[in-house]
Amino acid sequence: MEGPARGSQTDGPSQDSSRNKLSCRSLWQRLRAAQLFVRRHLLDNPRARWARRAIWAAFIAWAGFLAWQSIPYYTYIGQGKRAYQQGHYGEAEQKFQAALKQAEHFGQTDPRYANALNNLAELYRTQARYAEAEPIYNHLVTIAESLRKNPGALRFTPNYLMALPMSLNNLAALYRDQGRYAEAEPLYQRALEIWDKQVKRPDDPNVAALLSGLAKLYRDEGKYRQAEPLYKEALAIRIKALGAEHPDVAVLMDNLGGLYRDMGRYKDSELYYEKALAIDQKLLGMEHPDTATDLNNLAGLYRDQGRYAQAEPLYRQAMAIRRQVLSPQHPHVAKSLQGLAELKAAQGDYRQAEKLLDEALSIRLKTLGAEHPDVASTLDSLASVYLAQKKYSVAGPALARALAIRQKKLGPSHPDVAITTMKQADMLRATGHYKQAQQLFSGAQATLEKALGPDHPSVAANLSLMAGLYRQLGDLQEADKLEKRAAAIRSTIR
C-alpha cells in the first residue's frame, strides 16, 4: 500500500493557503490604492484644503465634546476628595454620589465609573458603614475580574491590570476592619501575586498599599514579626515615590509606630509617632482626623510608659477633633474614650473609667456589632476596672464575653486571647480558685511568649500576677523568682 506523497500535507503549501496569500496580496493592493487616492485628492491637493479643515474641525469638536462631558464628573470627584481629606464626610458623600451619577453615563467598563464607586465605598468604610461598603467593593471586584478577561473593554486605560489587585486590597481592608481576618488574608495574598506576576511595578506607590494592608492584618492577628518587613518595604516605596513629607508616608510611619508599641519597642514607637504627627500637623492641620489619630496613638504610648500627665491632654484633644469632624458616635471616638478610661484606671479613678468605657462600649456595639474584636477590647478593659474594684459578679461575665469573641475572631493562639485568659486567672486567684488560676496563668504565659517573645510587657504583667498567686500559696521563693523576671523585662522596656 502506498503512503502519501512526501510533503503533500505538512511540508508544502496547500491550495487554501495559496488562495489566502493571493487574497491578502489583493487586499493590500486595494488599501495601498486607497491611501494614494486620499493623498493625491485630499492631502496634496490645494483645492481640497476645505476637506482637510473639515476633518480637523470634526476631530477637535469631538475631543471638545468628550472633555466637556467629563467636566462635571471631575469637578465632583475633586470636591469630594477635598472634603474627605478635610474630614467633612457629609459633603464628601454628596459629591461622590453626584460623581457616580455622572459616571453612570460612561458605562461600567469606564475607569471613571469604578473610581467613583471606590471613593464612595472608602468613605463608607471610614465611617464604619460596613454594610453599605461591602456590596460596592464586591461589585468593583466583579468588574475588575471581567475587565481582566476582556482587556479590550478598557482600551483607553493602560493601567487596567491594576484594577483587580487594588479592588481585592480594598475588599480585604473592609474584612479586616470587621475582624473577618480569615477572609481578608487570601485576598491580600492574591492581590500581591497578581501585582508581582502581571503588573510588575515594584516601585509603584499602589503596591505599598497592598504591602501595608497585609502588614496591618498580621499586626491585628498578633503576627508582629511578619508585619515589620512588610511595613518597612511599603514605607521605603512611598518615600521614594512621594518624598519624605507626604500624608501617605505619615500613615505608614504611624502604623509602624503602632507595631513597635505592640512589640514593646517604645523608643522606636515614639520616634515614628512623632514623625507622623509632625507631617500631618504641617500638611493637614490640627483639625484633621489623621492628626487626631496621631495624637491618640502618641497618648496611648505615653500611657503605656506611665507618662500620664503627657497622655491625658493628647487623648482629650484627639477626642474633641473626632467628635467635631467625624461624629459623636464614630468608632474612633470610642477608641479615644477607651484610651482615656484606661488612663483613668491606671491613676485609680475607677468611677470615671467605668463611665467612659460604658460610653465607648455603647458606640462600638451600635456601629460594629456584638462580635467585633474592638467590642471585646472594650469589654476586657471594663472587666479590668471591675476587678480593680473587686466587682467579681460583673467582671466574670464581661471577661467571658470578651474571651468568646476573641477566640472566635482571632483564634486561640492570639495574644489578646491570652491577655483575657490572664485576667480570668487573676479573678480566680482573688476568689480562692488557685488550681484553676494556676492552669490559666501557665497557658497564658506559653501563648504570650510564643506570640510576643519573652521580653514583652504583657509577658511581664502575667509573671507579676503569677507571682501574686504563688505568694498566696506560700511559695515565696517561686514568687520572688517570677517577680524578678518581670522586673528585668520592665527595666529593658523603660
Image (cartoon, rainbow, N blue to C red):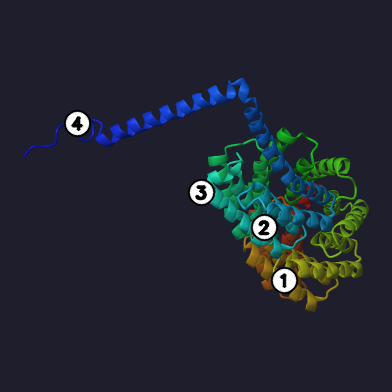
Which residue shows up at 72% across the image and 71% down it?
370
CB-based contact (under 8 Å), mark 2 and mark 3: no
Pick whichever of labels 4 and 1 is earlier in the sequence: 4
Query: Tag 2: residue type?
Result: Arg
Between label 4 and label 2, give the one nearer the viewer.
4
Element type where label 1 sits in the image:
loop
Foreground disc of the pair 4, 3: 4
Residue 155: numbered disc: none
Which residue is tagged 3? 149
**Circles 4 and 3: CB atoms closer than 8 Å:** no
Q: Earlier in the sequence, mark 2 or mark 3?
A: 3
Residue underneath mark 1 = 370
Residue 155 vertical position relative to residue 400 in the rendered view, above or below: above
Q: Amino acid at mark 3?
A: Lys
Whether residue 453 can be seen here = no
Q: Quadrant of residue 416?
A: bottom right
Residue of label 4? 7
Q: Earlier in the sequence, mark 4 or mark 3?
A: 4
Q: For this rendering, which residue is in front, 120 or 475? A: 120
User: Viewer-nearest of labels 4 and 1?
Assistant: 4
The residue singled out by tag 2 in the image is 176
Q: Position of residue 413 (x, y in %)?
A: 62, 60
Disc 4 from disc 2: Cα separation: 64 Å
Measured as percent of width and height from the top left, residue 54 is found at 65, 32
Q: Looking at this view, is 235 or 480 the one in front?
A: 235
